[in-house]
Amino acid sequence: MTESGERIAKFLSRAGVASRRDAERMVAEGRIRLNGEVLAHPASFVAAGDIVQVDGTVIGLPERTRLWRYHKPSGLVTTHKDPEDRPTVFQRLPPNLPRVISIGRLDLTSEGLLLLTNDGALARLLELPKTGWIRRYRARVFGTVDASRLAALARGITVDGVRYGPIDAKLDSQTGNTAWLSVSLQEGRNREIRKVMAALGLATTRLIRTSYGPFQLGQLPRGAVEEIPARVLRDQLPRPPA
């Protein structure tokens, strides 16, 4: 906040309406009004008592920040609207949840822990590699694992011109041509594990995220949602540098 209020993009992000980037695009499309006037610039500020509308709907003040664990099943895309009309994560959530956004994504055939929040600013913070939160997975792969090449991933790897950061990957078991791996990373780029494993000659046939930072999938049933208590959330959020 400043003496002038809060930037419109941040306000909408905290209210769970849209990411800051999407909010700026919505301003450019003329979809946002402030006190009845169409906003012309994303640098506009919202002050106490102002009325913000998106597509004609009044947006209330942001609620307290909340966070949920969700056990994403395979077969759902992590998006609010899919151009291919595939089923989405958000269509399967309980109707009593407020509008939420995901912290990072899991692709169509990936499963496991997906964190959800009503606060876009929190989502943005927790997705940044500099936050330092480790994402852990179990991966089932088809092929023969070369332990030395797996260990070398700790130095990073370039695949098709894209440089991926350090990945901690360990072989848990190998039965015939099927192996289970434990994989940990910080960035979590689009289909990163699948692409990296393919570069090692391994086809990923199942991918389960087991934790994101301090939060664990644990025994949460597939498709279930559970809110993280506010006290736990406060205790686990990254602290700003001193």
Image (cartoon, grey):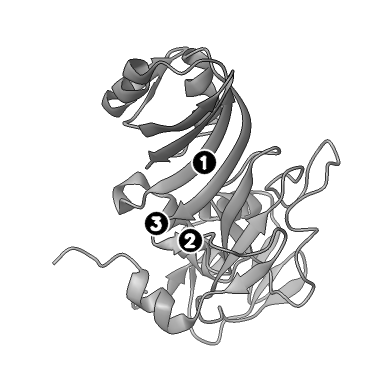
Q: Secondary structure at mark 2?
A: strand
Q: Disc 3 on helix, strand or loop?
A: loop
Q: Residue at x 29, y 28 (%)?
A: 154
Q: Residue 235: x percent and y percent? A: 34, 76
Instruction: Give the image location of residue 34, x and y in percent.
Output: 62, 71
Q: Which residue is mark 3?
A: 213
Q: Which residue is mark 2?
A: 216
* Residue at the extreme front: 175
Residue type (three-letter) at the residue carrying disc 3: Gly
The residue under label 2 is which amino acid type? Answer: Gln
Of the 4 image quadrants, the one containing the C terminus is bottom left
Residue 177's x, y, as percent?
Answer: 59, 18
Q: Which residue in the protein does label 1 denote?
A: 138
Q: Which of the two marks, 2 or 3, is nearer to us in this view?
A: 2
First of labels 3, 1 by sequence position: 1
Tell me if mark 2 has few (under 14), some (14-19) or many (20+) residues whose alpha carbon lies within 10 angstroms of its own.
Answer: some
Q: What is the three-letter code of the residue carrying label 1?
A: Arg
Q: Position of residue 64 (x, y in %)?
A: 51, 81
Q: Residues at badges 3 and 1 in contact (C-beta under 8 Å)?
A: no
Query: Which image quadrant is residue 236 in?
Result: bottom left
